[in-house]
Structures are given as structure tokens and as C-alpha cells.
Amino acid sequence: MEYTIRVAQAGDMEQVHQLIQELATFEKEEHAVEVSVQDLKEHGFGKQKLFHCFVAEKNQKIVGMALVYPRYSTWKGPVIHLEDLIVTKEMRGTGLGTALLDEVVKYGDELGVRRICWEVLDWNEPAIGFYESKGANVMRDWDVVQLDQKGIKAYLNAIA
């Protein structure tokens, strides 16, 4: 299967948003996506770029994407976080996921990062197997901790 991988452009964000929604549905969180196409354009291509995105294109349709952003580890130094690596259902098993991950790793190396990190749902065994086959360490003894927007407001109200 022929596809090309390139750095995303603002005009790609509608199709990227569709992929994000497809992933949310796969993860049984179809109503959790709050980010809009406009948010993606502003946050990825506005004055303050918050992320870097690669897209995979086949027949002028985006069939995969990988979105990363910078972080800093007090133990390691510069890090990038892979927020999502998404491949459309029809393109799974074609090597596209590997090709996108290759681009992320090359990008991280170009930036001089000391770690690339991401999360995977504990029930997504195909993804876990894929990442482990690439040499990634799935750290099953760590839990993800978050404050969502409502939690942030509640926290601030509690300390006010």
C-alpha cells in the first residue's frame, strides 16, 4: 500500500480531527473529545505552537497521524510526549503505524530528547504488543493522574 508521511499543515486539521474522533470511538470515549478543528489549527499553527503533527496520506486522504508535544523531565531533561498515534481501521496491519512511529523517533532524536513517552490503555493488547515489539517499555506499575477542567476549577475554589 502506498502512502506518504509528511508534517501536517493547518488545512489537514479537519481530517486529523476526524481521526481523533475515530480513536475516541474505538476507546469507547466518543463523547470525550472537546477539542475543535479550530482549536487544532490555533494550537498547532498559531502564534504559540503547542504540538507537532505528522500525517500519513493515501490518495489525498489522511489515513494516519502522530501528534507530539514537548515536555521536560526533572530526571532526564528534554522529552517529547506522543499524545496520539492513530491509523485508520482499513490501514492497520500495513506498516503505517511503524512508519509513523519511525517519524516520531527520528523527530525526537533531531530535537535531542532523552525520552519519548506516551500512554496506552491497559486493555489495548494489540497496541501494547506493537510498542513492546519496537523496544518500548510499557510501565504497568504507574498510574496516570489528571485534573480535568472541572477538577482544576474545583481545586482552585477549594484553595481560594
Image (cartoon, rainbow, N blue to C red):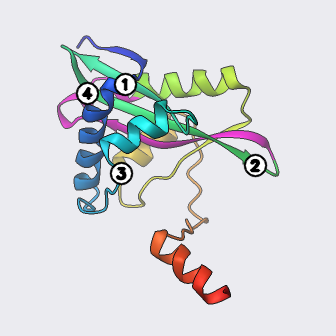
Q: Where residue 81 sits: x, y (%)?
A: 58, 43
Residue under label 1: 55
Disc 2 residue type?
A: Ser
Residue under label 3: 35
Q: Secondary structure at mark 3?
A: loop
Contact? badges 4 and 2 (CB < 8 Å): no
Give, as a single range, the part of the protein colored magenta: 76-97
Q: Where residue 75 sits: x, y (%)?
A: 82, 50
Q: Residues within 10 Å of mark 3 (few under 14, many from 20)?
A: few
Say which quarter of the image contains residue 111: top right
What is the spatial separation of the Cα atoms under label 3 and label 1, in whole angstroms? Answer: 18 Å
Residue under label 2: 73
Q: Decide whether residue 102 is among the magenta residues.
A: no
What is the spatial separation of the Cα atoms under label 1 and label 2, in whole angstroms? Answer: 27 Å
Q: Residue at x 56, y 33 (%)?
A: 47
Marks 3 and 4, the one that precedes in the sequence: 3
Say which quarter of the image contains residue 12: top left
Q: Residues within 10 Å of mark 4 (few under 14, many from 20)?
A: many
Q: Is residue 141 left or right of residue 64?
A: right
Residue under label 4: 63
Q: Residue at x 27, y 39 (%)?
A: 19
